[in-house]
Image (cartoon, rainbow, N blue to C red):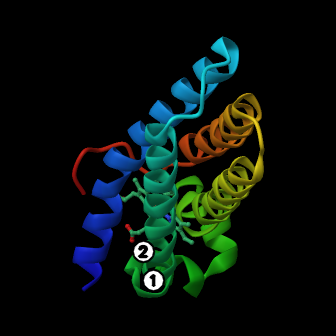
Amino acid sequence: MYEFLANTHNLIRWIVLPLMLVVVVLSWSGFFTNREYRKSDKTLGVSMLGLVHLQLLLGLILYFVSPMVQLALDDFGAAMKNAELRKIVMEHPLVAIIAVTLVQIGYSKAKKAKIAIRKHKTMAIYTTIALVLILSRIPSWSFLR
Ligand code: HEM
């Protein structure tokens, strides 16, 4: 089960990160050109939200079944001194949870906003910050595990 979850979590990043980038680019361009908020903007936003929540769910389960996390938690003090383990056990999960929360807040605020330019602006700001946070703490950039 661990291998399946870790591979899925690893692979979904190749969908969710480009999708977030598309949302960032379209929201900023929508804001600067003051274009209408289209159905496609909404669909992209919902898809992004669903996928980051799926990553959150997989990540939370992984936290309890990953041998690497287990190893780190066995000697937490030593793990904190090892940059790679610290990233996997602490920095990546914590920063990703903050990022998922920002995506959720951004989406909800944009949904409530009455005018298109405000929807674009809200999506653009929250998604940009979330994307930068996630990118700053990705444990590994190798294509496959
Ligand atoms: C959009 C959000 C996220 C993305 C794009 C993402 C991406 C990744 C990637 C690329 C890896 C490396 C896998 C490998 O070594 O091959 C990874 C590992 C991991 N992630 Fe995430 N992650 C996200 C959110 C989360 C969250 C919210 C948690 C926990 C609450 C989490 C927990 C973990 C853990 C524990 C591992 C290490 C698994 C292992 O190899 O044993 N991730 N993540």
Q: Label 2 vs label 1: CA separation?
A: 5 Å
- The label shown at residue 58 is 2
Residue depicted at 68% across the width and 52% down the height: 111
Give the percent coordinates (x, y) of residue 115: 75, 36
Give the percent coordinates (x, y) of residue 50: 46, 63
Give the percent coordinates (x, y) of residue 45: 52, 48
Indicate left or right for 51 with 127 as reference: left
Indicate left or right for 134 with 71 as reference: right
In the picture, which quadrant includes the C terminus?
Answer: bottom left
Mark 1 sits on what residue?
61
Q: Nearer the viewer, residue 133 or 100?
A: 100
Q: Are marks 2 and 1 in contact (CB under 8 Å)?
A: yes
68 is higher (above) or lower (below) than 106:
below
Q: Nearer the viewer, residue 74 or 134?
A: 134
Asked whether mark 2 and ligand 1 are closer than 8 Å, the reply comes as yes
Name the amino acid, label 1. Answer: Ile
Residue depicted at 42% across the width and 74% down the height: 58
40 is higher (above) or lower (below) than 99:
above
- Disc 1 secondary structure class: helix
Residue depicted at 50% across the width and 79% down the height: 63
Asked whether mark 1 and ligand 1 are closer than 8 Å, the reply comes as no
